Image (cartoon, coloured by chain):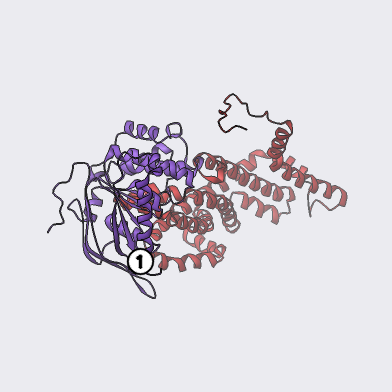
Chain colours: A red, B purple
Amino acid sequence: MNADTPPDETEDPPPEEVDHRVRRFVLALAPFSGIVALFAGWEIYVRLSGVGPLTLPLPSDVLWHVVTNADFYWEHGLVTLQEAFWGFWLAFVLAMLVATIMAHSRFLERATMPVIVLIQSTPVAVLVPIFIIWFGFSPWPKILTAALFAWVPFVANAVTGLRAVDEDTYELMRSVDASRWEIYWRLRVPHSLPYLFSAARICIGLALVGAVIGEFFNSTAGLGNTARVAQSRVLVDQLWGSVFVLAFIGIVLVVVLTAVERRVLRWHSSQGLI
Amino acid sequence: MALTDTSIPETATGIHFAEVSKWFRGQEQVVHALSRITLDIAAGEFVSLIGPSGCGKSTILRLAGGLLQPDKGIIRVGGEAPEQARRRKHYAFIPQQPALLPWQTVRKNVAFLGELNRGAGSAGISAADQLELLEHIGLGSFIDAYPGELSGGMQQRVSIARAFALGAPVMLMDEPFSALDEITRADIRYRLLEIWRRVGSTVLFVSHSIPEAVILSDRVIVLGDRPGRVSKVIDVSLPRPRHEDIEDSEPYHALVSQVRAAVKGSSVRS
């Protein structure tokens, strides 16, 4: 090989191999295959083992029940979804407020930390009766329970995201005398976004759990209510139907969140940019 | 006091240290970082600081930039206290790491510092000039790329463009090429010189590479350690503009040897 050989600019990349395309297609199907396998295994087990529908119904029966009672589940699902939704955002806003204060003052961070640990280590479900005493039959006890469940992961990740910024970038901004406000909006907040998204993934589930637990204690509607009523009246279809619809809501919300995350965090290495 | 330089050109600003000392207080011990540093860097001059690690090179840079306060002595940048110069956006800083915002494109990263602290009245060079600068530094086709899509050398070039985009009279560079491989470094230092020649700002450059300091500078200041102090000042009288061929010249090699000997003699450990 001669060192003076000019680069060959007409050279084409090799064609994509069929094998490679098949592999990508199979990979794209992988998330669905797990769920299909779970339901298939469940269906086969119930049919072969002969356990009664009271113990474990056929998943196909439950699905059919949900589809034929779609209006009923839509109505109650919407109630739970709204409680979880407002609880989620309340948790987010409160967490950002607290984390912003904590990220700007070592003293306040140290003062607040024990309170967060206290909330984290208290089984917050026991607070639901207190919320009911305060707010009665309104949606607030459910929203507050959802918010309380979702708050801790949000605040923990927000503090890390706002505080653990790149020191060189921070110094660079100081070198042009950027204000605290500029450092907050242009450095700390964007830096915390990946942390907040990974918290949000967990918090969506937690907010739903919180809303359902709130409904267990006191409610006239919602999937926590339908499940509780079904249990007391031994309506196995409705009990499992509530579980299925809750799981479905959770999956849809996570899928929506993932889509938003893909857009917002295009730059981030977790999105396979590099 | 003779600290104020009266013959400062419009685009550049001199840096003056008079008997500056600095201590760092750790948890267990007090470290004497700098002792009686006196420097006179003329407006438009390119000066390198070199010396053993821990000799306070970066500390001098941060004192000059008003990011640290001296315990003793006086520092003036264009006749002002560094704090004041910083408030007026008189500094362009190039840190060791590129320190780009990963969520912004190359174009926005370059404009970023100019958009901050608008009250100071300086927004840096125009958007058109920024694009020309990127073109000149070889990033013309990457203006809409994110930093994560660029190689380390390209990221560092963005960092250099970002600093020059400020149009500041004083540039502070803290070993900006230390994370790059030798081939990339060799390329990037001449690009730096080329842009600097057109801008004419005062440069304080921290380096741990002797050849690099010689190639770039008008003067090399050799520092000794424990505590950091000025050990020797060497004038680099190579003609400008400089290109790669100076590295083959006899005076260049003589200067490199001279600086190397001075660095060797500067450390209390040797």
Residue B219 in percent (x, y) is at 29, 51
Q: Nearer the viewer, residue B141 or B104?
A: B141
Residue name at image x 35 percent, y 39 percent: B111
* Number of marks present in the image shown: 1
Instruction: Tell me which chain the residue with mark 1 is part of.
Output: B
Q: Is residue A218 shown above or below A194? A: below
Q: Position of residue A14 (x, y in %)?
A: 66, 29
Q: Which residue is mark 1?
A: B225
Q: Residue lying at the far left in this picture: please name it.
A: B1
Quadrant where the C terminus of chain B sits is: bottom left
Front one among A183 and A258: A183
Q: Is residue B20 left or right of residue A142?
A: left
Placement of A73 over or under B234, stated as above or below: above
Residue type for callout 1: Asp
Residue shown at 73%/31% (left/top)? A18
Binning the other alpha carbons within 10 Å of mark 1 as few (below 14), some (14 to 19) or many (20 upward) gives many
Can residue B174 be seen here?
A: no
